[in-house]
Amino acid sequence: MVHNSSVPLYWRLRKSKYNLIGTRCKTCSTAYYPARHLCQKCRRKGEIEEFKFSGQGKILSYTIIRSAPAGFERYTPYAVAIIELAEGATISGQVTGKIEDIKIDQPVIPVFRKIYEDGSGGLIHYGIKWEIADGQRA
């Protein structure tokens, strides 16, 4: 599998992808992930600041991927979920562990895992996946 990633883009997104860094409006306290430059609620009146999310969250919805996109076939079946973070923002991501154990409203925590690599000699991409908070691991 060859993705041919952009190295500058990879490094530019590293902070937010690896540390759950987004933004929050100082005016209304709405949190955003990924980061935004303008608050959707306050518009120009809002003042945006960098914000580190706690990582605590729960599963709002999920799906089981059985027919994966090119390059990810060997990982099937796997679960992808919409996670609501404790601070209110939502994020999507892969849930590790046994897919039959995943449930709506289940608490999850972020874990740092390998996502994919750009061929045999390319970049190895790591990032956040989600683990069921009771300690079940893949």
Image: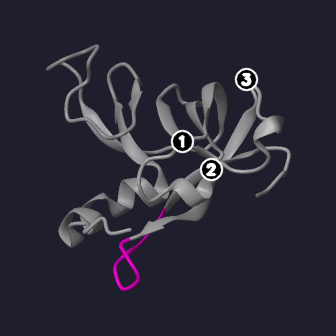
Identified at 77% across, 27% down, the residue is 103
Residue identified by numbered label 3:
105
Circles 3, 1 touching at the beta carbon (< 8 Å): no
Residue identified by numbered label 1:
67
Q: Position of residue 76 (x, y in %)?
A: 62, 50
Instruction: Answer with the quarter of the image where residue 51 lies.
Output: top left
Q: Identify the amino acid type marked 2.
A: Thr
State how far apart marks 2 and 3 are (Cα): 23 Å
Disc number placed over residue 49 in the picture, else none: none
Does the segment drawn in magenta span residue 34?
Answer: no
Is 66 on the left or on the right of 137, as rendered? left
User: Is disc 2 surrounded by few (<14), some (14 to 19) or many (20+) residues within 10 Å?
Assistant: few
Q: Going by the picture, which residue comes out furthest to the bottom?
A: 121
Dot 2 or dot 3: first in sequence order is: 2
State how far apart marks 3 and 1 are (Cα): 25 Å
Residue identified by numbered label 2:
76
SS under mark 1 = loop
SS under mark 3 = loop
What range of the chain is rendered magenta? Answer: 118-126
Circles 1, 2 touching at the beta carbon (< 8 Å): yes
SS under mark 2 = loop
Is 24 on the left or on the right of 41, as rendered? right
State how far apart marks 1 and 2 are (Cα): 7 Å
